[in-house]
Image: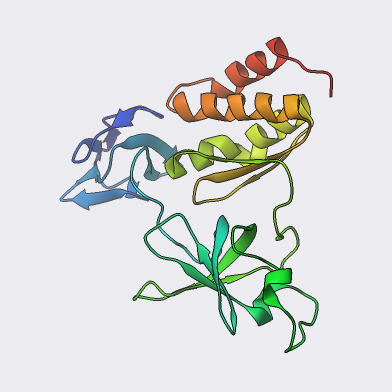
Amino acid sequence: MSNLTIQERDIVIPGESLAEGMDYLPGDNTYRKDEKIFSKVLGLAVLSGRVIKVTSLSGPYQLKVEDKIIGEVIDITMSGWRINTGTAYSAMLNVRDATTRFIKKEEDLSKIYDIGDYIIADITKVTSQKLVDLSMRAPGLCKIVGGRIIKINCQKVPRVIGKKASMILLIKEHTGCELTVGQNGLVWIKGTPSGELLAEKAIKQIEEKSHQKGLTNKIEQFLIANKINK
């Protein structure tokens, strides 16, 4: 007979038993030993059908293909730009992947993206040697102009986004700000000064209280209590 030894959204530690029996399947950050499933990390237990996952609450960002990140230009080369990804490994944005428009051979690349600029980009390649390529050719990928950039724990990104982007939409509605959340933990907020400040406070609350149940309702109440004139 199979049974869960934890409840949905319980905080679990590495090595903690999550389920017994073969009816459940190990998902992200879990492993099976004999007929039991254990957690690999400190995190929140999540049950998705028969699959048990753990959403990590700690640890650095791991570069993954198809992730959208926010990065800073740290160098300009003959073939493109080197980008700080917020990890131990920088990434390369080649000229051919930097924009949908044609870039002439003689163009000054610093006029497109200069050192210190922040960009929104997709990760297109991560090799075993951690050579990373980026692209900015998809809709919504651009140089960041205006607004503010804040840093959060990258493991809290799913909570900040919410199911089907519910948390992001909630913050947008109450602050009038545009929000872009990078999987590497950088968040771009753009709106009025008061709207940006309120959005930042809400995001920081989500980061601090990510383990709590009913968080969406709590954040909505916070936003209503601190309502601004957009």
Q: Position of residue 33 (x, y in %)?
A: 17, 50
Residue at the image point whose x is 40% and y is 29% from the top: 9
Query: Could you say which quadrant of the image residue 109 lies in?
Result: bottom right
Seen from the viewer's position, the closer of residues 140 and 4 is 140
Seen from the viewer's position, the closer of residues 111 and 24 is 111
Indicate whether 12 appears above or below 65.
above
- Residue 137 visible at all: no
Indicate whether 161 appears above or below 93.
above
Seen from the viewer's position, the closer of residues 81 and 207 is 81
Q: Position of residue 212 (x, y in %)?
A: 45, 22
Residue at the image point whose x is 37% and y is 60% from the top: 88
Q: Residue furthest right?
A: 230
Q: Position of residue 151 (x, y in %)?
A: 51, 40
Q: Position of residue 32 (x, y in %)?
A: 23, 51
Left or right placement of residue 29 versus residue 136 in this view: left
Count of numbered circles in the view: 0
Left or right placement of residue 16 versus residue 203 in this view: left
Q: Residue furthest top?
A: 225
User: Where the C terminus falls, by quadrant?
Assistant: top right
Query: Could you say which quadrant of the image residue 119 lies in?
Result: bottom right
User: Where the N terminus falls, by quadrant?
Assistant: top left
The chosen color scheme is rainbow
Residue at the image point whose x is 79% and y is 82% from the top: 102
Q: Residue furthest bottom?
A: 105
Seen from the viewer's position, the closer of residues 7 and 147 is 147
Left or right placement of residue 42 versus residue 189 in this view: left
- Residue 222 visible at all: yes
Indicate whether 57 appears above or below 35.
above
